[in-house]
Image: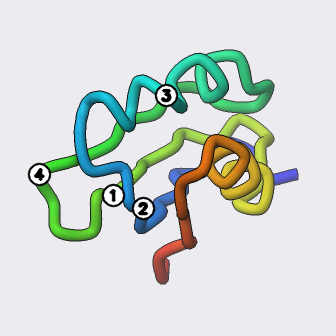
């Protein structure tokens, strides 16, 4: 378990509509303190404050909604 870490992902969440499609799943996911997507950034960076969730679990949530997410180098 990764506790109290900031996880960053490169995604293809390009707009508010894309973000809204993953919002409920990320909001409900156990182990996420808070999260944000910077759609103005070229990498469409998803930042997650982990309170136990792993990178793999976040990637699975995003992929389950039809989008891509890959962990960024720390």
Q: Which mark is residue 45?
A: 1
Viewer-nearest of labels 2 and 1? Answer: 2
Position of 49 relative to 21 (above/below) = below
Which numbered disc flags the more N-terminal residue, 2 or 1? 2
Which numbered disc flags the more N-terminal residue, 4 or 1? 4
Q: Secondary structure at mark 4?
A: loop
From the top left corner, tell me how far across and down residue 18 is, in percent: 37, 37
Q: Which residue is mark 4?
A: 40
The Cα atoms of the two marked residues, 2 and 1, are separated by 6 Å
Q: Which residue is mark 2?
A: 11
Q: Which residue is mark 3?
A: 21
Position of 70 relative to 41 (above/below) = below
Mark 2–mark 4 CB contact (< 8 Å): no
Pointer 3 local density, CA inside 10 Å: few below 14, some 14–19, many at least 20: some
Q: Secondary structure at mark 1?
A: strand
Viewer-nearest of labels 3 and 2? Answer: 3
């Amino acid at each position: 378990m990764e506790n109290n870490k900031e996880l960053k992902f490169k995604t293809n969440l390009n707009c508010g509509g894309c973000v809204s499609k993953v919002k409920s799943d990320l909001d409900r996911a156990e182990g996420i303190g808070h999260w944000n997507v910077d759609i103005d950034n070229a990498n469409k960076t998803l930042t997650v404050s982990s309170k136990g969730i792993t990178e793999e679990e976040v990637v699975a949530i995003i992929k389950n909604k039809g989008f891509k997410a890959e962990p960024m180098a720390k």
